[in-house]
Each structure stands twice: as structure tokens, then as C-alpha cells.
Amino acid sequence: MKSSVVYSLSLAVLLSLSACSTDKIPGVYRIDIQQGNDVTQEMLNQLEPGMTKNQVAYVMGTPLLIDTFNPDRWDYIYSYQPGGGEREQRRITLHFDDTDKLTRIDGDIRTVAKADLPQVERQDKNVIVPLTEKKSGLFSKLKSLIGIGDDDEDVEVIEGTNPPKPEIDQQQVPDTDIQ
């Protein structure tokens, strides 16, 4: 009886002391914590002296801190701590003059001249979505299955739209200028 009380008391003391441990418990998932405005190098490269506050807010987003006593200073602070890792913090401060124009950039991230950046070529593609809807019944489906049906007769144009016109790619059309 006495030994069971000693064992249970020692187990309770051991468990209570392990709860106060500062060591990381293995196998416990810790989430990544992101706080503030994530300011990228591309955003900083778009900033130019003389930009208005509205233009800067469009590029950078709403600042995390606007000083009440100095509204011409905007602070962008970003903090990232991976689960169980070391915390990383970045700070960018933008200064404006009395006419609300950007004058100076301070902070932890460096600005790079646009000539030093690698050029990225954008490739935009246009996709044509037809605004027609094909309605067919059982008889027309059987005709098209056999191969005697006409596909164009069953197309109905949705109201308020114009049927799409085929576009000609100028790169594929041969040059036929006669001199």
C-alpha cells in the first residue's frame, strides 16, 4: 500500500515537472506564423520617388503602422516564424513629404536598380469562349450518332450575345503583297 502511494506520488510529480519543460516535445506539430505585410523585392522595385500615397498603397498594400503624430511615415513590418524555428522579422519604412510624395525608403530589404534585375518575359494568351449553347433532343442525337445529322442546325445563340467570329492569326497568314 505504501509503495503504491509513493509510486503514484512520484508519477504525479514527474508529470507536473514535465509540463513546465522548455524543451520541444518531439512529434508535436507547430504551425508557421506569418504576421504583417509580406513585402517582396518586386514590390520595392516598383516604388519610385515622387509617387503619391495612393500609388504607394496600390503597390505595397495598406501599411501595418501609420504614426499618429507623423502621418508622413508608413511602416511595413513582416514577421515569419516557421514551426519550431527561429523568428525572422523585416521592416520597411516609407517617408513622404508635405505634398504626400514618396521621398525616402528605409529598412531591412535592399532596393535593386531595374537594370540589374533579370528580365522576365511574359506570355499572355487569350482564350475564346463560345457563347452558344447546343440543344439537341433524342432524335437529333441518334441522327448525329449515325452520321446523317447536321451539327449546325441545333445551335442556339444565347440572347444578348453575338456569336463568336473566328479570328485569324496574323503570324499564320502568308504575306501576299504584289508589287
Image: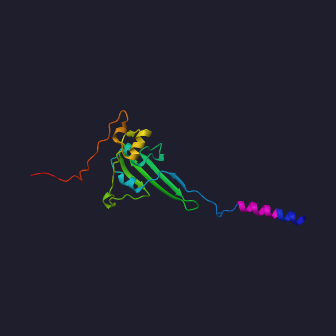
Query: What residue lies at 41% left-to-right and 45% top-to-bottom?
Result: 72
**Secondary structure character of the magenta stretch overall:** helix
The quarter of the picture where the N terminus appears is bottom right
Query: What residue lies at 46% left-to-right and 50% top-to-bottom?
Result: 76
Q: Is residue 98 above or below residue 29?
A: above
Q: Residue furthest right?
A: 1
Residue 163 part of the magenta-drawn span: no
Q: Position of residue 95 (x, y in %)?
A: 40, 49
Nearer to the camera, 17 or 159: 159
Nearer to the camera, 39 or 136: 136
Q: Is residue 97 above or below residue 108?
A: above
Residue 14 part of the magenta-drawn span: yes
Nearer to the camera, 131 or 138: 138
Q: How is the image coloured?
A: rainbow
Q: Position of residue 107 (x, y in %)?
A: 43, 56
Query: What residue lies at 41% left-to-right and 50% top-to-bottom?
Result: 94
Q: Position of residue 11 (x, y in %)?
A: 79, 63
**Residues shaded magenta:** 9-19
Q: Quadrant of residue 52?
A: top left
